[in-house]
Image: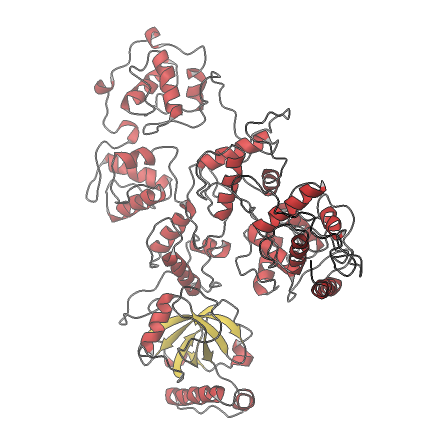
Amino acid sequence: MIKKRMLRAAAMALLAMLLMTSSASALTLRYPQRGSNVTSLQNALTQLGYYTGVIDGIYGKGTRASVKTFQAENGLADDGVAGPATLEKIAELTGIHIGDMPSTGDPGTDTPAAGSGLFGGVYTTIQYGMEGERVRMLQQALDALGFDVGKVDGDFGSATYLAVKAFQKHQGLTVDGKAGKLTLTRLESFFDENGNCTSGPIVTTPPVQEQGPSYGMPTRTLRFGMAGEDVRYTQQRLAELKYFTQAANGQFDSVTLTAVKAFQSKNALSVDGAVGPKTIAALFSDDAIAADETTSQPPAEDSTPTPTPAPTDEVVLYRTLRYGNSGEDVAFMQRRLIELGYLAGEADGQFGTNTLAAVKAFQKANGLTADGVAGTMTYGVLLSDAAIRAEQTPAPLPPEEEDTTDPNGIPERNLSQGDSGNDVKSVQTRLIALGFLSGTADGQYGSGTAAAMKAFQQMNSLTADGEGNPSTYAKLYSDDALNSTGVKQGQSVPAYTNLRTGATGPMVIRLQQALVKLNYRLTVTGTYDDATYEAVRSFQAINSLSVDGVAGKNTQSLLYSGSAKAFPTGGSSGIYGSMGYVAPPAKSQIQLLHWADELKTTLGHNQAFLVYDPATDISWSLTIIARGRHCDVEPSTKADTAAMHAAFGYKETWTPKPVYVRLPDGRWTVATTHNVAHGVNPIPNNDFEGQNCVHFLRDMSETEQNDPDYGVTNQKALRKFWKELTGQDIPYK
C-alpha cells in the first residue's frame, strides 16, 4: 500500500508545479524553466535529432537553440520558445504529447483540479521514455495494485511499459502501454482522496508478461544504417511476430529493412522501411498482425517501383545485376538464360565472366544495349514471352574468345601502389563515384588511391589493406557497395542520428574515417569505442562545440562540411592533450579578462577551453561543468588528464599554477589552476575521478568577502603572474 503522507505530498507538489507552469488552454515552455515537461521536450527533440545534450529537464541554452533550429526547419517562428504550435508539430512528428496537450485517443482536456484524484485532474499521456514525478506516481500506484514495475525511480522504462500493459489488459482497456486519460482515471478509481489504496492488490502474483524476450520501445525514428539498443528491441519484436529470423544484433541492416517493410505491408502502414511513430505504435501493440496470421486488410502500397512480374514460384528481380554480384536473384536470372540457351551449366548464383557473356549475348540478340548489366529493361524482355532464344540468332562467342581485357571496366589483376593503366583508372573512377576519392582518374595507383581503397574496404567490411583484389572488385562494382556516406548508391543519406559509445555500423565507420582524415587519434573499427569517444570530444573541443562525446547533428554536420578544424600536430613539445599541439601566444595577445564581468556569462556548460602552461610548454583541454565564483571543470579526455599531470610534475597539489587560457572564441587570458580531483565526477572515462577548478580574475574585495582562504590565494598568485608577465599591477578594487 502506498504511504498516505508520501503520496499526498507528491500529489500536492505535482499539482502546484502544474498550476504554475501550465494553463487549461495551452502550454508554453521557455528558458529557463525546468521540470518533467522540459524532459519530455528534450526527449522528443533528441528523437528528431535536434538536441544532443543531457536530458536533465532544464530549459537551458542548448534546449533553446535546439528548439530554434527545429522551428526554423519546420516553418515556425524561430523564437526558441516551445509554444502550442511548436509542441503540436513535435507531437505530430514523434507521437510525444507534452504537458497539458490532449493526447490522441484521450477525450477531454487536462485541466489541473485540486482534490480531483490521484493525478490531480491532469491526464496527459505518460509513456515510454518519459521521466519525472508523474512517472513516479504512476509506478507507485501500479506497484500498490500488484503490478511489477521494477524500480520506482520516475523513469518510464520497459518494466513500467509492461506493467501498464498488464494493468490495461486486466481492466479491459486498450492495451498499448501508454497511460492516457482512460488508463489514469481507471487507476485512480482504486485509491481514495488521500491516496490510500482502497482495494488492496488486484493481482496477487506477478502477471504473465509478454512471451519471448522483454524489450523497450524506440523513442526515435529508426532507418536503414542505424544501430543501437532500440534497433535490437525492434528486431526482437519483429522476430516475435515472425518477420525476422536472425539474431537481434542492433544493426538496421537489409534483413531488418525487409522485415520492417513486410510488417508495414501486413499491417496496412506506409511501406517505407522507416520505423517511425506510427510503425512503433503498431509494432508494439497487442493488435500487431504477425507474419503467419491471415488478414482481410489489403496491403499498403509500397513506395518502391513495381518490378516486371516474374513466375509466381520464383524470386522477383529488384536490383540491377552486374559482374561480381551474387545471390538468389542472380541464380534466377541464370536459370532464365539457361532456359533461353544463352548460358550452359548450372545456376550457381555467381555473376562471373560466363554470365557476363551470356547477358551481353542476350541483350545483343534482343536489340538492347549490350553492356552486360541486367537492369529493368533487360528484365522486361528476359522475363517476357517475346524474348528471342539463342538458337534463333548466331551463337555468341564463348567467353574465352571474347575480349576479356578489362571486362566492363573490372580489373583482372591485383593492384597496389606503383601500378598504372586503364584498370587503375577504372578503379579510381568507381572510387570517385562512391565518394572515397577526390580529383580525377589519372591511372596512377598512388598513396591517395590506396587510402581511398582502404576507406572503401573498411566501409564495406573487407580486409582493409588498400589493395585491389577479386573480393574487393566484386563489392566495388556491385550495387551493394556502400558509398562514403554508408549507404548504397541511389539511396538517400539518413537523417543525422546521435552516435554514442556502443554504436556500430556504417555510420560509425563514416564518422571514424572522417575523424582520421582530420588527424584525430583513433582506429577505424566500426564500433564507437573509447578511442572514438575521446576523438569526438577532442573534435568538439577544437571546433568550439559542446563537448559531450556524442556525435549528434551539430558535430556530424560540421565534421562532414569540409570546413572543420583538424587535430593540430607538430611543434617542439611531445606532450599535449585533446586539442593537439598549441604554440604559445605572444604577450600582446594575452588580455586581462574579469570572471564576473567578461567571462562567466559568455562561457557555457560543456564548452571546453585550452590551458597552456608556459613553465613546461604543455597544454590540455578542460570542459566546463559549472560556473560559480570560479569555474568548475574536468579534463576533457584521458589525454588531457595525462598532459595536466605531466605539467604538475606528476604530483597532485592544490598550489595554484599560473597558466594561459585560450577561450572558445580564440581570446587568450590568464588564470590559475590545480590538479586535485574532488567533488562531482560528471565526465566518465577520463582518468580523473572528480572536478578541479580554474580561477580567473576577480575583485579582491569580493574574493576576501566570499572566499577568504583558497580564493584569495589564487587571486594573489594570478596578480603576481600578471606583474611578472607585463610589469603591471592589478588594482585592488
Total numbered circles: 0
Q: Is residue 650 visible?
A: yes
* Position of the N terminus by quadrant: bottom right
- In the displayed structure, 650 sits above or below 704; it is above
Q: Which percent across, then down, holds residue 460? A: 35, 41
Q: Quadrant of residue 68?
A: bottom right
Q: Residue furthest top?
A: 392
Q: Quadrant of residue 589?
A: bottom left
In this rendered view, identify the residue nearer to me: 562 or 398: 398
Q: Quadrant of residue 21?
A: bottom right
- In the displayed structure, 156 sits above or below 659; it is above
In this rendered view, identify the residue nearer to me: 316 or 481: 316
Residue at 49% across / 66% down in the picture? 606
- In the displayed structure, 158 sits above or below 289; it is below
Q: Colour mode?
A: secondary structure
* Position of the C terminus by quadrant: bottom right
In this rendered view, identify the residue nearer to me: 18 or 664: 18
Q: Is residue 374 visible?
A: no
Q: Which percent across, then down, holds residue 224? A: 48, 40
Describe residue 220's horizontal placement relative to residue 250 as left or right: right
Q: Which percent across, then down, holds residue 722? A: 41, 87
Residue at 59% across / 61% down in the picture? 63
